[in-house]
Image (spheres, rainbow, N blue to C red):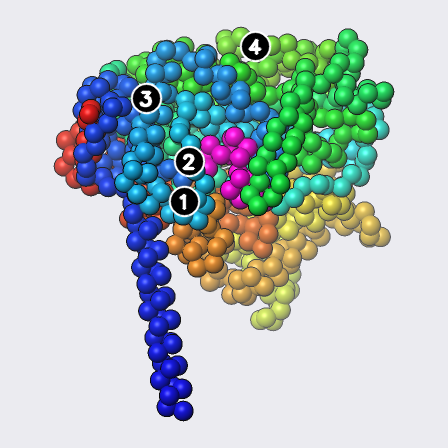
Amino acid sequence: MQVFFQWLFRLTGGLVVLAVLTVLGVYYLASRSLPEYDKRLETNGVHAPVEIIRDNANVPHILGDTDQDVFFALGYAHAQDRLWQMVMLRRTVQGRLSEVFGTSTLDIDTLIRRLDLYPLAVQSVQSQDQRTASALRAYANGINTRIDEINRDSLGRGAPEMFLFPNAVAPWQPADSIAIQKLMALQMSGHIQAEVLRARVSLLLPDARRLRDILPDAPGSGVAALPEYASLVPNTPRFAASTARSQHPLSPVPKRNLAGASNAWAAAPNRSASGGTLLANDPHLGLTAPSVWYLARLELQAGGVIGGTIPGMPLVLTGRSDDLGWGLTTAYLDDQDIYIEELNPENAQEYRTSDGYKPFVTRKSIIDIKDQAPVTLTLRWTENGPVLPPGQFDLGTITPPGHVAALGWTALSAHDTSMSAAMGVMHAKTVQQAVAAAEAYIAPAQNLILADKDTVALKLIGAMPKRAGTHQSRGRLPSLGWRPENRWQGRLSYQANPEFMSPVGGIVGNTNNKSVERPFPLHVSYEWGDSQRIRRWQRLMQGRQVHTRDSFVETQLDTVSFTARSLLPLIGADLWFTGSAAPEGSQLRQRQRALTLLAEWNGEMSEHLPEPLIYSAWLRALQARLIQDELGPLATEFTHIEPLFIERVFRDVEGAAVWCDILQSAPKETCTDMASLALDDALIWIDEHYGTQLESLRWGDAHQATQDHQVLGDIPLLRHFVNIRQSTSGGDNTLQRGQTSGTGDRPFENVHAAGFRGVYDFADPDSSIFIISTGQSGHFLSRFYDDMSQLWRRGEYVPMSLDVNLARAAAVGITWIVPK
């Protein structure tokens, strides 16, 4: 027995030692890829010494003799900190994820190949101006220098993820950066989903008033009536089942309500306490770890610029120079149309056009799949655009037999000069110069908010499709591709893009709201990203005669929900402080406690309060009860509250209160009945997930920011190191926007928010501030992986200074890149 225990002890000890050695070995290999910031690098890629000073937030300040050398160093710095992220973006837009992840990403690759984004980017390289082409080449050389250094010096393959997925990393090309810009256009576009959903709902709801209820138009002048989809495209199945599958974390296709969003506003000197212009910007994108954004300062020949970059592109997309500040919001321009193309019944390789049947333009494309046989696709194009399979975007549900769906989209350009336009904005000195430079911008459509020393402006940038005034669906529904009146007729003049230059009121801004009301086809869009945040913004802007940097920060971080303040009095009108006394522990007593809390609440979506959770659960349950009998399985597509729908129902606009009556039940339910039942539903759901003590609930427990690693975030144990989870304030309709997932067991998780915030004061530019949501590094062993995340959560910022002495005084490292 003693011998047995001796051997058991030895075996256990050996296993412990082996485990420790394994952990140490893994840590050693992973830590080898941690970049060294204090170094000297000799290379043939630069013409003169370049200095990269990393300030105490690890923001690189890049100083060089030429712009080419500066862009080279930016590429090198991006690759030091975010190589894995850049490689994944490139693989995504090339349709090559399945080479790494197998069949789980085959749907993504299939869609991207059919859209042909990467070949279009390759062709677009020749369309760039000389300055941009030179920057793209220098930037690519900087990335490749880092890749060569990793291979030469055995620097842990450049990132820990590379050990788990050891596929070779190809050299970076200028086309890769343009392709990533096109990928961003896909991530920010939601009109495909909107068209398909409107078509599906119209097939179920023949009454146009009910369609206006559940898919309401943004407030403003009315929109002329549209035909029913069934009359536009006959023989479409009315109850076609959805073919959508669960979405892979790497998918670039946004879910409905989760396309791009943002806030931006600017104040002229007469509305500024300091006498200089002010500008604030916080772009909203899906939360990830690391953040989409990377902060950088570039000292160009035209002067210094500092702000938010996206690794993979040599641009400061939102930021400032000494002379100009620029910010972006998603414009929601209707730049996508779905076309229903009729196949030739005698030859399925042909489709109908206005001149008779024509063959598809086709090309083979092979997708290599890890541990599987490759898949060969036949890519097809019509005159309107690429043909998409029925499984994508649920297109099969609105495509009748004998037809296919094709996509028209401005981003599908082989002469895309958006990169050159963005480069021009970054080099501009005045608002007028920036507006002129942006004329070459194609996609994704953006609102460009600008401020120089004297002037503020907003200009929609991006190609606006030119549609005929007789277009059958005005771009709101899929239309017949062979009808000449449905086809695009080129691009509208840049002068047709909405512009607000030096407004009389001195303040200009956008929260993805409806910005103009113009008759079709100059309408910009029928689908807008917001009808609520703009109301709160208007009040905060008009509440002061003059503004300061701090008041802009206060507005950026505001968490008061206009939606809650406007809807709660409606849905609770007959419920407040009514009913007899109820014993403790009863459902009626719980309902009374919830209503009392909400009646005394000011609508602030603070992470520390219980009311936001009660309110959100109530509204979610209410909308589900209102629509599930009319829409059936299609009700699951409405994952987020539509405030205008709730308001129409409870104000009985055009008879909308009919939604409150359950079709299948004999009694006639009122909207008060539905509000009461939905509150009970919400309280039961809260009890099951968070307990019965309403006063002790915290909105932040449900509204956690899910900054997850897109690849490693689901791996047990490892996810605790790579995911960044935080309790957050705000909600779907607050200025400090924290868009909820709307699905699953945790529907209120914060999945889409401001990954970058910046506020610029041109009376004292170096007092400007900014922040990103995670940290500069993409390496989870780096102290800069999540060091900004708590600052971001608390609403704090770091300085945005172009003073090189300040950066040098607290530098965490200085890299010299010198010619060989």
334 inside magenta stretch: no
- Give, as a three-letter code, the residue at label 1: Met
The mark closer to the camera, 3 or 2, is 2
| Distance from Cα at disc 4 to Cα at disc 3 | 34 Å
Marks 3/1: CA–CA distance: 25 Å
The one of 188 and 39 positioned closer to us in this rendering: 39
Which amino acid does the dot numbered 3 rest on? Ala
Q: Is 103 one of the magenta-colored residues?
A: yes
Alpha carbon of mark 4 to alpha carbon of mark 2: how far?
A: 41 Å
Q: Do the CB atoms of the residues marked 1 and 2 lie less than 8 Å apart? A: yes
Question: Label 3 belongs to which residue?
Answer: 138
Q: Going from the N terminus, do you reach mark 4 or mark 2 first?
A: 2
Residue nearest the observer in this picture, 125 or 467: 125
Q: Nearer the viewer, mark 4 or mark 3?
A: 3
Up the image or down, 257 lies above or below 264; here it is: below
Q: Quadrant of the N terminus?
A: bottom left
Which badge, 3 or 1, is on the more N-terminal residue? Answer: 3
Q: Earlier in the sequence, mark 4 or mark 3?
A: 3
Specify the quadrant of the image occupied by residue 309.
top left
The disc label shown at residue 108, or none: none
- Specify few, some or many for label 2: CA neighbours under 10 Å numbering under 14, 14-19, or 20 or more: some
Q: Is residue 229 left or right of residue 587?
A: right
